[in-house]
Image (spheres, grey):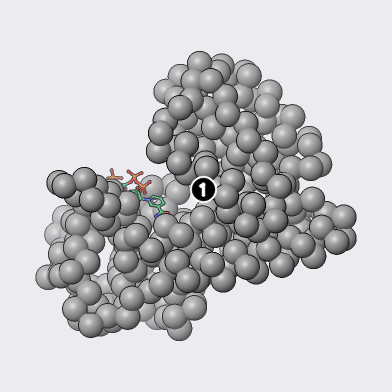
Amino acid sequence: MATIIDGKALAAKIRRQAKEEAAALRAQGVETGLAVVLVGDDPASQTYVRAKHRDCEECGITSFDYTLPADTSQDELLALIARLNADTAVAGILVQMPLPAHLDAERVIAAIDPAKDVDGFHPMNLGKLVRGLPGLRPCTPAGIMRMLEEYGIDPRGKRAVMVGRSSIVGKPMSLMLLAADATITIAHSSTAELEEACREADILVVATGRARMVRGSWVKPGAVVIDVGMDRDENGKLCGDVAFDEVAPVASAITPVPGGVGPMTRAMLMENVVFAARSQAR
Ligand code: NAP
């Protein structure tokens, strides 16, 4: 039976460290504020935003809540971002995605000062990731790398398969595994013989949004399986992209859903805020 990678416990440790670092920065007169911008009243987004404010409170990070009506114009949103870019009390800016359809998310992300882009989605920060330069990294893949490190799983020389190629998970995850010297396959909805590709993996990371898609027979015995998915099954129960009950007996280590990648993503945001504050103070 696989080791269950406890993202919840590790996330709590990261929040404790972020709290200590935020306090140390404050003692030097450096602000660690996070501005969270939410446009509209999508219930899932509201839940995520509330969680971010709670995490900030726990870490002693001041959070600023900007909840805007669903009909906010592109210009109004860009004007707010310009104000936040200039505000020295704000070390990090997060615009909750998805934005309402009339807003251009790419333009909004590009308008954020890259030094305050705590989601790590700005083209400048993604470019730094490609070039192997230090910078703000997207929280989900950064959290996964931290879990691997904590559990003594070194990607070097291993075959890693990333199922999913989104800009927030699949692509940055692949680059981080590559930077850690893994040999990478990136699979997606047009990949032929996906099951065979997955069976090659020593480290299998799945981010498709397809409930329990990866079955036990898709996994090489002893593989490490990281499940990014946050899906609902046919009974409305939260589950991942991996059929946990089938895969856990085959894998050597696996992340549960909930309690795996999700809490780590949240915790890495706090770490990014501290990183952003420290870099701007230099
Ligand atoms: P996304 O933007 O929808 O991307 C999904 C990716 O999966 C795409 O690249 C897509 O391929 C691929 N895919 C879809 N169906 C597939 C199939 N049947 N076979 C192979 N590949 C397939 O999703 P995302 O934002 O990366 O999120 C993925 C999942 O992770 C979702 O469940 C999301 O809720 C969850 N998530 C969790 C966290 C967390 O903190 N736990 C963070 C972010 C996301 P194409 O590119 O060819 O369409």
Would you say 66 lies left or right of 261 here?
right
Q: Give the image location of residue 252, x and y in percent.
A: 28, 81
Q: Give the image location of residue 143, x and y in percent.
A: 49, 63
- Residue farthest along the right direction in this orientation: 28
Q: Residues within 10 Å of mark 1 (few under 14, many from 20)?
A: few
User: Can residue 177 be seen in this snapshot?
Assistant: no
Q: Is residue 238 above or below residue 143?
A: above
Which of 230 and 73 lies nearest the eye of the viewer?
A: 230
User: Which residue position holds label 1?
Assistant: 51
Q: Is residue 207 above or below residue 144?
A: above
Which of 107 and 42 lies nearest the eye of the viewer?
A: 42
Q: Residue at x 40, y 38 (%)?
A: 44
Q: Quadrant of residue 151?
A: bottom left
Q: Amino acid at mark 1?
A: Ala
Q: Give the image location of residue 11, x and y in percent.
A: 51, 66
Image quadrant in which the C terminus is located: bottom right
